[in-house]
Image (cartoon, rainbow, N blue to C red):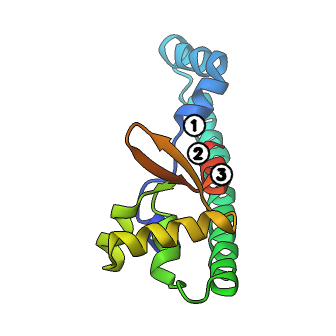
Amino acid sequence: MLNDLLSNPVLFLSGYIIDTKSEYYRLLQEVRTKNNWEGWIIYMLKGVEFTANQSIQQINAIQCLFEETNTSIKTKLPKIYSKELTELLFEQPYCKSEFLTQRLNISRITAAKYLKELERIGILESRKVWKETLYINNKLFELLKT
């Protein structure tokens, strides 16, 4: 799971730039007016370092949550446990029965049963959205918001 995550971009500088907007514009202006490339490059490198450290912390927190969730399912729901199920719960912060039927090759009835069991032990929380029930992985959702 972690290897899949790392194959996608996880470094987004826009948050850093927004948070330090005045410094960004000041240094950009200095590049134009004073040819101060050194200040601009140092600013951008600090942004890369800051954002990379945040991303590493987030990845580690997601990996830890994955392991906790995997252990919890294995312990509390051994009859439905599979690593594929746990991985599926971490592909997106929500799940629905059709995801399980397609990936785990199980019936809709079995998928609904799995999701209700995962909700019962506190891993997912169901929410009715229009005509569909979504099952939210709230802990993962909170980690992704940071």
The residue wearing badge 2 is: 48
Mark count: 3
54 vs 120, nearest the viewer: 120
* Mark earlier in primary sequence (3, 1): 1
Q: What amino acid does circle 2 point to?
A: Val
Q: Nearer the viewer, mark 3 or mark 2?
A: 3
Q: Nearer the viewer, mark 3 or mark 1?
A: 3
> From the viewer's perspective, is 142 left or right of 102?
right
Q: CA distance from mark 3 to mark 1?
A: 25 Å
The 10 Å Cα crowd at callout 2, few under 14, some 14 to 19, many 20 or more, is some
Q: What amino acid does circle 1 point to?
A: Met
The residue wearing badge 3 is: 143
Q: Is residue 87 above or below residue 32?
A: below
Q: CA distance from mark 3 to mark 2?
A: 20 Å
> From the viewer's perspective, is 110 left or right of 28?
left
The residue shown at (54%, 13%) is 29
Does the CB distance between marks 2 and 1 fall below 8 Å? yes
The residue shown at (67%, 45%) is 50
The residue wearing badge 1 is: 44
13 vs 42, nearest the viewer: 13
Residue 131: x and y in percent read 37, 41
Q: Is residue 86 above or below residue 61?
A: below
46 vs 55, nearest the viewer: 55
Q: What amino acid does circle 3 point to?
A: Leu
Rendered image quadrant of residue 40: top right
